[in-house]
Amino acid sequence: MPVARILTGIQSSGRPHLGNLLGAILPAIALSRQGGHESLYFIADLHSLTSIKDAEERRANTRAVAAAWLACGFDAEANTLFVQSHVPEVTELAWYLNCFTPYPMLANAHSFKDKRERLADVNAGLFVYPVLMAADILLYDVNLVPVGKDQVQHLEIAADIARSVNHLYQQEVFVVPEARVDEAVMTIPGLDGQKMSKSYGNTLDVFAPEAELKKRVMSILSDSTPLEDPKNPDTDITARLFALVADPAAVAEMRQQYLAGGYGYGHAKKALLAALLERFGPARQAFDRYMADPAELDRILQRGADKARALAHKRLAVVRGVMGF
Ligand code: ADP
Ligand code: TRP
């Protein structure tokens, strides 16, 4: 059976970084170009309220994430790009789904378990986070959800909820979604070598002004091997990041230079900055254009919300009907 609908979301809890681009946005765009299906990609601004409370920050991040999708080449005309809160029906569905979600399923979710030691910091929104995510998916009759490994459990929860509703009402109220984890997508290291993540403050903001990007690249952690000594390109963070963004010939050359010695981390960082600017040059320009034209961004997101909403109304009508509302 050909895949009909693909959906994925990225929270607007920060500006999109290199890890988001290489790990989520670019692969999802490549998938959307394969044809034979429709892609719905959205900015999960409601989810970001579990952590971010500042309105201006959320607005700015929401726009930046939308601009990043478009700047990286997502075709929002052939597909759908929208903001989660522009289809508020998703919160109605989330309520219905809450009433079909067993407590232990949520108590076992990694997203909650990781924070269980500090319960005072856990708001109810964070606890039911996977249910809102299930609503995101089930509202739009989605078949396939491309996500990182960390989201697989959330997809299992969404599929479980869909199956239990279908079972109870003895009909296909929801399409049962499937996760698509791209094993080829690796974890992008951050400036300190841990996973690049907003929560660790170790990100490279690919769309930042050049001077800022340069400062970040220059602050990548390196060891104190003297300039003249050979260095390990497989463990050094700069070399690892370079290998992810530069073309293969340049990567092979840098490896040789690392192994030969006489090549310093400062050289490598300059090469990494140049590679980032080359690889993402057109996207950086497009990003700035979208950020400078809020009316155009709003027009695209409004169109996306209209398309998503039409699907949402159809599914919600069925749900209200079977549940007696
Ligand atoms: P963050 O960890 O910065 O908060 P998110 O959890 O919002 O990022 O991730 C959004 C998407 O980007 C997810 O699909 C996630 O798998 C992907 N992603 C985030 N960080 C990385 C990384 N370091 N390497 C690969 N993919 C990543
Ligand atoms: N929880 C996802 C993340 O942090 C974002 C997200 C929200 C999502 N709703 C979704 C992803 C629905 C896929 C489908 O990465």
Image (spheres, rainbow, N blue to C red):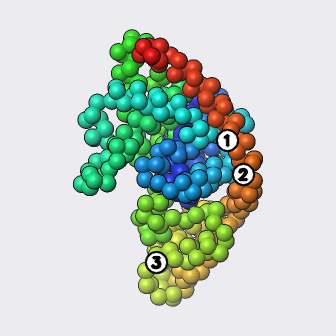
Asked if 250 appears above or below 58 in the picture, the reply is below
Residue 49 is situated, as x and y percent measured from the top left of the image, at 46, 48
Q: Are marks 1 and 2 in contact (CB under 8 Å)?
A: no
| Pointer 3 or 2: first along the chain | 3
Q: Residue 222: which disc? A: 3
Q: Residue 301: which disc? A: 1
The quarter of the displayed image where residue 311 is located? top right
Q: Which residue is mark 2?
A: 294
The number of discs equals: 3
Report the Cα–Cα distance between label 3 and label 1.
41 Å
Residue 313 is situated, as x and y percent measured from the top left of the image, at 57, 23
How crowded is the residue under tag 1: few (<14 C-alpha within 10 Å), some, or many (20+)?
Answer: many
Question: Helix or strand or loop: what does disc 2 sit on?
Answer: helix
How crowded is the residue under tag 3: few (<14 C-alpha within 10 Å), some, or many (20+)?
Answer: some
The quarter of the displayed image where residue 255 is located? bottom right
Question: Helix or strand or loop: what does disc 1 sit on?
Answer: helix
Residue kind at label 2, given as amino acid type? Pro
Residue kind at label 1, given as amino acid type? Leu
Foreground pick, 67 / 181 = 67
- Let me know if residue 204 appears in the view: yes
How crowded is the residue under tag 2: few (<14 C-alpha within 10 Å), some, or many (20+)?
Answer: few
Answer yes or no: disc 2 within 8 Å of ligand 1.
no
Question: Helix or strand or loop: what does disc 3 sit on?
Answer: loop
Residue at x-position 46% and y-position 78%: 222
